[in-house]
Amino acid sequence: MIKVGIVGGTGYTGVELLRLLARHPEVRVEAITSRSEAGLGVSELYPNLRGHYDDLRFSEPDPARLAACDAVFFATPHGVAHALAGDLLDRGTRVIDLSADFRLRDAAEWEAWYGQPHGAPELLDEAVYGLPEVHRERIRQARLIAVPGCYPTAVQLGLLPLLEAGLVDADHVIADCKSGVTGAGRGAKVPSLLAEASESMKAYGASGHRHLPEIRQGLGDAAGGPVGLTFVPHLTPMIRGIHATLYGRLTGEPGDLQARFEERFAEEPFVDVMPAGSHPETRSVKGANVCRLAVHRPGDGDTVVVLSVIDNLVKGASGQAVHNLNLMFGLDEHAGLDAPAMMP
C-alpha cells in the first residue's frame, strides 16, 4: 500500500484528491495538513467523505510525518511547495505539486509572473511537467512532478496534434477559454459570490494571465520553437468545467484532421476524440479524469477549430495528479480514476 500525504487539504483540489483516493485500491492517506483547520476531522469539514476518512484529521504541517510517506501532494497556493519540497526529496519522499511552483523552467520568468523570488530554483531542472500525454516515460522515473494547470491542460491537449505536425501557423494561435468558478479556489472572494457570478460571463486576464507562459512553454516544445499565442480566459456561471475553443490557421492541406487526432490519442486512456462534427459539453466530463476533443474545419477553409473540455478539478488538477502518482509507482493508469462523468 502506498502511503501519501496531502499538504493543503481544505481547498477544492484537496477535497478532490481525497474523493479520488478514497476509491484507489493501492493508496492510503496517512496525513493531511491545514493550519487553519488543524484538529478538525476530514469528514466534519467535508460530509461527502463520511465513511471513508472518519479517523483522519487535519494537522499542522510536520515535515517528519510527511517524510514518512511514499509521496506527498501539494494542493497549496504558489510558494508553499518551494519551502518543503527539497527536504522531502532529500528524505526519499516523492513530491507531486499541484501549484505553479515548478511548472516554468525559467526561474526569472516565474518571478516576473508571480511577483516573488523563486524559492527553489535548484529543483527546476529535476521537475518533470506532469502531462502524461507528452511526458509519460519521464514521469515514470520522476521524483518531483509539476502538475499542469487547468487551462494549460485543455489548451495543450487540443493543439498538440496540429503543432507537432506543423499543420498550423505557430505565430498566430488563439485560445478562447471559459472556466467555472471553482477555478478561482475556495477562498471567499466577492467576484465568486453567487450574486456576482450568476447570470453573467466576463473575460479576465486578457492582457496577460499567469497560465500564459506555461501554455507557451508546452506549445513551444510541441512546435519545436516559439508559439505566438493569444489566450483569453473567461469566468462562466457554472461550478466546474473548462471549455477551450482553439483556433489555428492552416499552413497547407492538412489531410484528414479527424484521423490525425484519433491517431495521436489512440493510446491515451484519458483523452476522448469525439466523432466528426461533435460539440463536446463540459457536463460530459464532470467528475471524470478525461479530456474530450472535437476538431472542425469550417467550410473546408484555412482555419481549424478545436473544442476541448475538461473538469478543471479533475483532469485539470487532482485527477491528473493521481494519474501521475500511478505512473510514478508503476500502477494501472486507471487506478482511482475509472469512474465515469456525472450527468446531469
Image (spheres, rainbow, N blue to C red):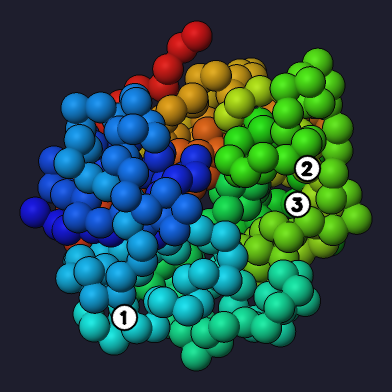
Q: Which mark is residue 89?
A: 1
**SS label for mark 2:** strand
Label 1–label 2 contact, CB within 8 A = no
Residue 315 point in image, percent of width and height: 47, 41
Q: Report the residue marked by disc 2.
A: 233
Q: Earlier in the sequence, mark 2 or mark 3?
A: 3
Q: Residues within 10 Å of mark 3 (few under 14, many from 20)?
A: many
Q: Which mark is residue 178?
A: none
Residue at (22, 45) in percent of width and height: 56
Give the amino acid at mark 3: Val
Gap between marks 2 and 3, in whole Å? 22 Å
Give the amino acid at mark 1: Leu
Residue 69 point in image, percent of width and height: 20, 66
**SS label for mark 1:** helix
Residue 129 point in image, percent of width and height: 48, 66
Gap between marks 1 and 3, in whole Å? 41 Å
Disc 1 versus disc 2: nearer the observer: 1
Q: Which mark is residue 168?
A: 3
**SS label for mark 3:** strand
Residue at (47, 79) in percent of width and height: 83
Front residue of 188/304: it is 188
